[in-house]
Amino acid sequence: MSVTIYGIPNCDTMQKARAWLAAQGVAHSFHNYKVDGIDRARLTLWCRELGWEKVLNRAGTTFRKLPELERAELTPARAIELMLAQPGMIKRPVLEVGGRLTLGFKPELYAAALAGAG
């Protein structure tokens, strides 16, 4: 079973998620999208499966610092362009287990995702 967690290393929620995976003995790879970026196809898939409104982190400082004009009247395509340009706007973590996605971190969601893949 392939497990990948996407995010940035200095995010508190990411650290909790990675610690939880380690405590459960779950081998996983980490994709730092601030360093490694995120490709359009993968981000588009996430937005299609999870909803771009959920994938775009409007509460984060990166999004809030955008000029009002850029934040107004977002479309799926515009949101994807913003997230590609500044991956810090992607909600984190994104957990991919055997091709299935979980957004954010809650231990019970991760346990269910792992149980469903096994």
Image (spheres, rainbow, N blue to C red):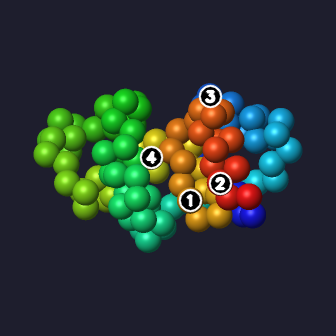
Residue at image point 56% right, 59% down: 100
The quadrant of the picture occupied by the N terminus is bottom right
Kind of residue at disc 1: Arg
Q: Relative to 12, is 56 above or below?
A: below
Residue at image point 25% right, 57% down: 76
Residue linked to disc 2: 116
Q: Which mark is residue 67?
A: none
- Of the numbered discs 1 and 2, the one sitting upstream in the chain is 1
Q: Viewed as shown, does residue 24 lie left or right of 57? A: right
Residue linked to disc 4: 90
Q: CA distance from mark 3 to mark 2?
A: 26 Å
Q: Relative to 86, is 40 above or below?
A: below
Residue linked to disc 1: 100
Q: CA distance from mark 1 to mark 2?
A: 9 Å
What is the x, y in percent for residue 54? 37, 43
What is the x, y in percent for residue 82? 33, 53
Secondary structure category for the residue under label 4: loop
Tell me if label 3 and label 2 are in contact, CB under 8 Å: no
What is the x, y in percent for residue 84? 40, 58
Tell me if label 1 and label 2 are in contact, CB under 8 Å: yes
- Of the numbered discs 2 and 4, the one sitting upstream in the chain is 4
Mark closer to the observer (1, 3) = 1
Residue at image point 83% right, 36% down: 23
Tell me if label 4 and label 3 are in contact, CB under 8 Å: no
Kind of residue at disc 2: Gly
Tell me if label 1 and label 3 are in contact, CB under 8 Å: no
Residue linked to disc 3: 12
The furthest residue to the bottom: 41
Q: CA distance from mark 4 to mark 3?
A: 15 Å
Q: CA distance from mark 2 to mark 4?
A: 25 Å
Kind of residue at disc 4: Ile
Kind of residue at disc 3: Asp
